[in-house]
Amino acid sequence: MYPRAKSLAVAMFCALLTAACSTTQAAPDHTGPSPLTASAALGDFGSVDYCSLLNVAEVAPGAVAVPTFETCLATRGTQKVQLGPLAFDSDPNIKPYPYLGSVPEGVAIQQSMFNDRSACTRAITFADGNRLDLSVTDTGSDQATRCGVADAAVGSALAAVTANKVGRLTFPDRSWGRVAPCVLLDSHDLDAAAGPGSKPTTSLSGHSCIRGKVSVKLTVETTEPQSPPEILGGRPARVRTAGAFCLVDTTQPAPGVPGRRELAEISVVETAGTANDATCALARTAATSILPRLPTP
């Protein structure tokens, strides 16, 4: 073959090869939307304003909503709608539920069968397994109406999340919202009450902590105290029992929020059954150690 003819043949072959390659198509993109995690939906758990997720005018018209450090509580007569807290532990009472509204990718709406004659409970479970609990309670017997309010609250929370309308709380100086509760439990003074070898474990929100049999929660008071106060750790405190728990509560005016009070709740659980005088003695001991370390307004 002449050199010129040979060069032409090679050029034609390369041209054909290039044309063949150019018809190959890129692989289709199957990534789609990312499954929605709790952190992507809510941001910093410690500063979420849960009342920003609850459209009270639509869900419970006329209700008064109070944001706490971990929840939003909306009260309308005897009806209470509570959104929050966040949880990461498993709950055997939570079952699948055919929620009819729109749900983001990776999110599941479930219901709890616990106490389902006086409460309707929902769980918004995110792709990372963390869930936002929601409940509606009242003194009536109309479960269908309660669950209608609960489903409306679920829709309100999902709408706020997908529209990036999650609000934030701010904690002024001396607010208990700035306190790390696990630091309060990290003391040898609590060894007897908490149990040997126990270690503090914080909640998702960072406003409550548990160490063995002792826990402490820092939040906003939503109900008026009923029992008379006594002095524990230099502060007026109220002691009460609730099932297996003995609880010690103390409050302070909420810095920067006129008319509201912050609440510190210390509890000791009686693992053998119902809380008794011995349980409350341990709770008083725990309070005597913890309360003096809380800031004052």
Image (cartoon, rainbow, N blue to C red):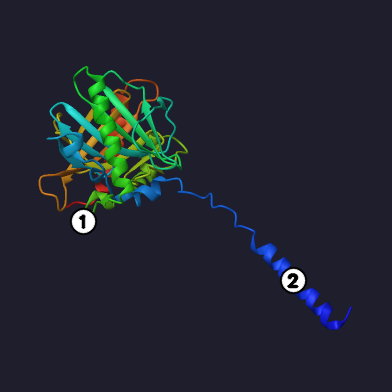
The quarter holding residue 278 reads top left
Q: Which of the two marks, 1 or 2, is nearer to us in this view?
A: 2
Q: Residue at x 31, y 40 (%)?
A: 216
Quadrant housing residue 137: top left
Left/right of residue 289 with respect to residue 67 in the rendered view: right
Residue 102 in the image: state x and y as whole percent. Answer: 35, 38
**Mark number displayed over residue 172:** 1
Q: Is residue 179 above or below residue 99?
A: below
Residue type for callout 1: Pro
**What secondary structure is marked by label 2?**
helix
Q: Is residue 270 left or right of residue 169?
A: right
Marks 1/2: CA distance? 73 Å
- Asked if residue 266 shows in the view, the reply is no
In this rendering, the answer to whether 264 lies above or below 97 is below
Mark 1 crowd level (few <14, some 14–19, many ≥20, 10 Å Cα): some
Q: Is residue 160 left or right of residue 186?
A: left
Nearer to us in this view, 189 or 274: 274
Q: Which residue in the protein does label 2 denote?
A: 14
* Residue furthest bottom in the image: 3
Is residue 253 visible to us here? yes
Query: Residue sitting at 48 percent across and 49 percent down?
Result: 32
